[in-house]
Image: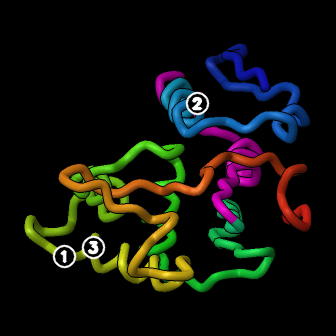
Amino acid sequence: MTVFAGAGNTVNQRDASSLDRRILSRREVDAIATILEILGAEAPSAFTRDIECIERHAFGDFEIDVRLRTVFRGGLPVHLTPREYDLLLALARRDGAPASAGELVEEVWRGRVGAGSRTISQHVLSLRQKLERNPSAPRYLVTIPKIGYRLEGGSRRVSTSDSAGNRR
């Protein structure tokens, strides 16, 4: 995809079909948003819709579809609360890197959780009960002592052609 400043500082989108062939990282999406903001332009709705459509993450037999805000296990939807979903997505976007409780509070709760709160650990416990075969010995949502949490199990971004059932 090519984004460039056209006449009158409007932003035009070219080669939109290439979005189906390339997954944008969160960093790339943020960079594009920053460029559009600097130019004083809004992203075309098709642009933002296509970005969301292609962002998918997979780990184990799970797939996170960002456009649908749904987690699938073996092709079947898993019911998560909005906060559980946001927490899982925040961990998935780190591609296996750990996240501290403070980082998760900022990203998922926008800093609205008090210090010493057990909110994060309670949400992680709830996610483990919904996703793990043995929540007391988690395979995916792992606690990293004195650091935070990490999503394990081969977390990876997948393209629309890789996804089970070709959901789109």
- Label 3 – label 2 distance at C-alpha: 30 Å
Helix, strand or loop for disc 3? helix
In the rendered structure, find residue 118 and report the number of the disc placed on it.
1
Q: Is residue 40 visible?
A: no
Per the image, the residue denoted by label 2 is 28
Q: Is residue 148 above or below residue 123?
A: above
| Nearest the eye: 122 or 46 | 122
Query: Which residue is depicted at the point 52% across and 55% down?
Result: 152
Closer to us: mark 3 or mark 2? 3
Dot 3 or dot 2: first in sequence order is 2
- The magenta segment is 37-60
Density class for disc 2 (Cα within 10 Å; few <14, some 14-19, many ≥20) is few
In the rendered structure, find residue 121 and report the number of the disc placed on it.
3
Percent of width and height locating residue 57: 66, 54
Query: Which residue is depicted at the point 90% across and 67% down?
Result: 165
Q: Is residue 110 above or below residue 30?
A: below
Query: Which residue is depicted at the point 72% across and 52% down?
Result: 49
Which quadrant holds residue 14? top right
- Label 1 – label 3 distance at C-alpha: 5 Å
- Label 1 – label 2 distance at C-alpha: 33 Å
Helix, strand or loop for disc 1? loop
